[in-house]
Amino acid sequence: MKTTMMMFAVLLLIAGPARAGDWEGTWKTATGEERTLTKQGPLLALDVTLADVDARAFHLKGAPAGSKLHLEGRLDPTAGFTGALSGEKSSGKKHTLVLDAELDATGSRADVKVQLDGAERSPETWSRGGLEIVALEADGGALGGTLDVKRSKTGLIVRYRVHGAALAITASVRPTSAHPYADFYSGPLVRSELGTIQPGDGIFKWDGRDETSAKRIALGGEYAIVLEAGAASARATVQVAAARFEAIGSKWPEGDGHKAWDPSNHLQLAAAVLFAGPKPGAPSFSFDGVTTAKSEDDVKAKAVTAASILFSTHGNEGLLTVRGDLLTQRYEPSKLFGRDLKDVHFAFASACYSGVKSGGQSVLKQLIAAGCDVAVGFSAEVDIAECDDFELVTLALLARGAPIEKAARDAGAAISKTTYSRGSCAPIQGATIVVERAPRIDETESLYPPRYGCSTN
């Protein structure tokens, strides 16, 4: 007995920082059996019954050594007097059972080698700890529908619960097989090590963006929220709202050198053209309807939550305009928006002189400085009827996946075959079309799949 205790003492010294608490508790095997390790002084004990060997339980003991645990026990050839009175059966043989277990890095799984009388038996896999997602929330309440990332103040809050044992949890967000544009992503949008979480409730937050340098808002569609800790895992799905298209114009009365003009019907048609995307059945942009703006505040309220914008209005060098009930307001986009357009992928400033400014910044350059990826406009005064057609053809090409700049220039060429009563206005084809791009955005940038812009521009 003294020799045995000395051996265990040596094992404990070798084990260093390992603690019985790292192993103590109830584990489950892959076949659903339970293995309960209990402390007995400095050692751990485990009772295991092998039904095909003996009705009695092996009483195993051992000490942890780092991530490893060696347990050993034996059965005498008889059940003994007490066992006989209770009806226990014995094979009449002496057996020795040895288990060598090794913890994985998460501490929630162990691979176990099993030897009976020196012969290998089927190994076991032990796991412990439960993990569940108990709620998905956003903006102070339960998430009842889609997560609109751009309008949300909090993003997604995932409430989860750990049962039974501390777990080293990894959280990930990935498109499901039901996502219409799953092939846009090469892997999870987000992968985060949450650390070792003690039993109880925890929170994982997702701001709705990917982990690339662009920090783009996730494409509209279904995503899986997956929490993993060894053999324990939990999963929930969330629907992210589609990127938002905004069509913004004003109703203009006769006067101020302009004809009466209400672009509402045309803008509604432009949105419908854009929604005819290249992937049948796949969702396009979300669209709340045409914005008939009467003030700068109306314009800003819609633009700052958009993914793509069509401004169809009058303009001057460096200025866009909006018509109120009594007067016309001229505004500089840089002053109105600041950096609030950082998630806008595409802005179409269909207005005279939007692409040019003698000194200072053009409207297009101001939109890029406010955060847009790509902006399209004109370097001269252009005709409204020709602008309307140019918008429709450009958006139709974009809806079929054409690069943004190419779509604009091809649209200009296409409508050049139509006769317009331009008066003194320049034709749109050729040098009149101006395309500006933010840093890191090249000429191959397209509008599909429908997405928000690079938020770090």
Image: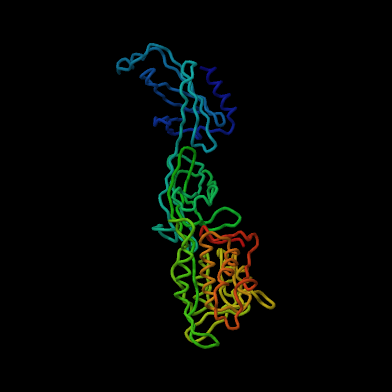
Tell how many labels. 0
| Residue 371 appearing in the image | no
State the image coordinates of residue 405 (x, y, percent, origin top left).
60, 64
Query: Of 385 and 418, which appears nearest the observer?
Result: 418
State the image coordinates of residue 392 (x, y, percent, origin top left).
51, 69
Indicate whether 337 appears above or below 456. below
Query: Of 392 and 367, which appears nearest the observer?
Result: 392
The residue lying furthest to the right in this view is 359
Query: Of 409 and 29, which appears nearest the observer?
Result: 409
Q: Name the quadrant containing residue 85.
A: top left
State the image coordinates of residue 350 (x, y, percent, origin top left).
56, 74
Indicate whether 180 appears above or below 288. above
Residue shown at 42%/58% (left/top)?
A: 146
| Residue 421 appearing in the image | yes
- Colour mode of the rendering: rainbow
Query: Which quadrant holds the C terminus?
Result: bottom right
State the image coordinates of residue 259 (x, y, percent, origin top left).
51, 85
Query: Of 159 and 413, which appears nearest the observer?
Result: 413
Q: Name the quadrant containing residue 333.
A: bottom right
Residue shown at 52%/43% (left/top)?
A: 196
Residue shown at 58%/63% (left/top)?
A: 404
Q: Name the quadrant containing residue 373.
A: bottom right
Residue shown at 61%/59% (left/top)?
A: 444
